[in-house]
Image (cartoon, rainbow, N blue to C red):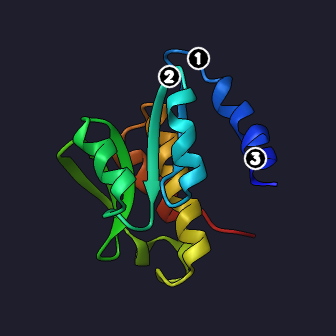
Amino acid sequence: TPEQVFTILRTQVDLVLPGGAAVLNAGYPMLVEMAPLCDGEVIFFATDGQLPALREHRAQGKRAVFARDGQVILASGDDEAVIASLEAIPLTEGGSASGAIENVLAAASAAWALDIRPELIRTGLETFTVA
């Protein structure tokens, strides 16, 4: 049931300590509902930067990663930084592989949560290939 799935998935968010971060896909309402359960920071990611949950999150000054106009954007509140073109990221197959784009955004979010510099995140995204 959806309730059971929520209970299982929330265990990972419940484990995040202050100073840690949970990376959650804002495109899934169930995951958005988990954000308040996190004792650390929540970084939302989404292929659609206009999702209400992501916009509200940013309005609170929080961090988010999303795709817009073929670009990967790191945002903190109103501040935005383009870090890479989706076309330049091999995993996205020229920016057309939607599932891979979500994975790229999640990876960028996780790296950013670890305070990896944006230029290093870009380099990782643009040089990672599947063997």
Q: Quadrant of residue 34?
A: top right
Q: Residue at x 48, y 70 (%)?
A: 89
Q: Nearer the viewer, residue 97 or 118?
A: 97
Which image quarter is the N terminus in? bottom right
- Circle 3: is it few (<14), some (14-19), or many (20+) Cα within 10 Å? few
Asked which secondary structure carries label 3, the reply is helix
Q: Position of residue 73 (x, y in %)?
A: 32, 57
Residue bearing mark 2:
40
Asked which secondary structure carries label 2, the reply is loop
Q: Tell how many labels.
A: 3
Residue bearing mark 1:
17
Q: Earlier along the polypeptide chain: callout 1 or callout 3?
A: 3
Looking at the image, the residue that sits furthest to the top is 18
- Label 1 sits on what residue type? Leu
Residue bearing mark 3:
3
In three-dimensional space, the C-alpha distance between marks 1 and 3, rounded to whole angstroms, equals 24 Å
